[in-house]
Image (tube, rainbow, N blue to C red):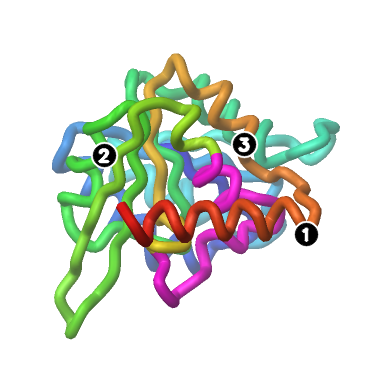
Amino acid sequence: MVIVVHDQADTLERNLPQFLTVASASQGEVIIVDDSSTDDTPDVLKRIKESNPHLYTTFLPKSVPNKSRLQLALNIGVKAALSERLVFADINRPPLVNEWLTGLTDGAVTAVYCRLKHGTPQVSHQLFDDMDEAANFILKAERRGGSGHRGRLFRMRRGMYDAIAVNKEQVVEAIKLFDQHLGMGRKMRLGIGVFFKNLFS
C-alpha cells in the first residue's frame, strides 16, 4: 500500500494501525510518503515504525519542484515497493476488515468500497478488465483537491472508492490520472458517466 500524507499526525495515530494490521495479515507492506510535513508527522511515523516491520517510510523534500507533488510522491512510494501489486490508499479511509486488502488482488484494476451498515463493516470490490476501463473512475475520484474520497452518499455509484489496486506495469499510467485539474464540463461528464455505468452494472 502506498499512502501520501502531509501534516496528518493525528490521522496517522488514529488510522495507520488499521492499515498495518491488514498488511500484516497478508504479509504486505505499507509505504508512507511524507510530503514535507511541518507538524509531528515525522515523529509519529518514526515511533510507529519502531514496532512495525510492515511499515516503510520515505519523504518528498519541500525543495523539489514538480507540477504535481502528489504524482511525484506516489512515484517515490512505488519505487520503494517490493510487491508486483500496488494499492493506492487514503489515510483518511482506513480498512475496516481484512477482506479490504485480500479482495484487491483480483482484476487488472480493482477498487474497494467500505462502509459501516448498522455497525457492521461491509466491503465490496469493483473489478476492471484493464486500465482503459478504469481510467474514468480513477480520474474522477482522484482529481485535484482529493475530494474524491470524501463523498458519503451513494459512494459506490459515484465511483468514490477507498483505495485502488493496480499491477506494477500499470503504475505509471495510473499515477498520471491523479491530481488532474479538470474543467467543470469534463467533471460533469465524468460524474454522469461513472454514475450511470455503476447504476446499471
Residue 154 is a magenta residue = yes
Q: Which residues are magenta?
A: 136-155
**Element type at mark 1:** helix
Residue hosting label 2: 104
Residue hosting label 1: 184
For the point 56% across and 45% down, which residue is it? 4
How dense is the environment of label 1, judged by Cα within 10 Å: few (below 14), some, or many (20 and up)?
Answer: few
For the point 79% across and 40% down, which residue is it? 62
Instruction: Pinpoint residue 74: horizontal percent, then vertical percent.
Output: 58, 34
In this picture, is 122 found above or below 169? below
Residue hosting label 3: 177
Q: Nearer the viewer, residue 126 or 51?
A: 126
What amino acid is at disc 1?
Met
The answer to whether 14 appears left or right of 119 in the picture is: right
Decide which of tag 1 and tag 3 comes sooner along the chain: 3
Between circles 1 and 3, the one closer to the viewer is: 1
In this picture, is 156 found above or below 90? below
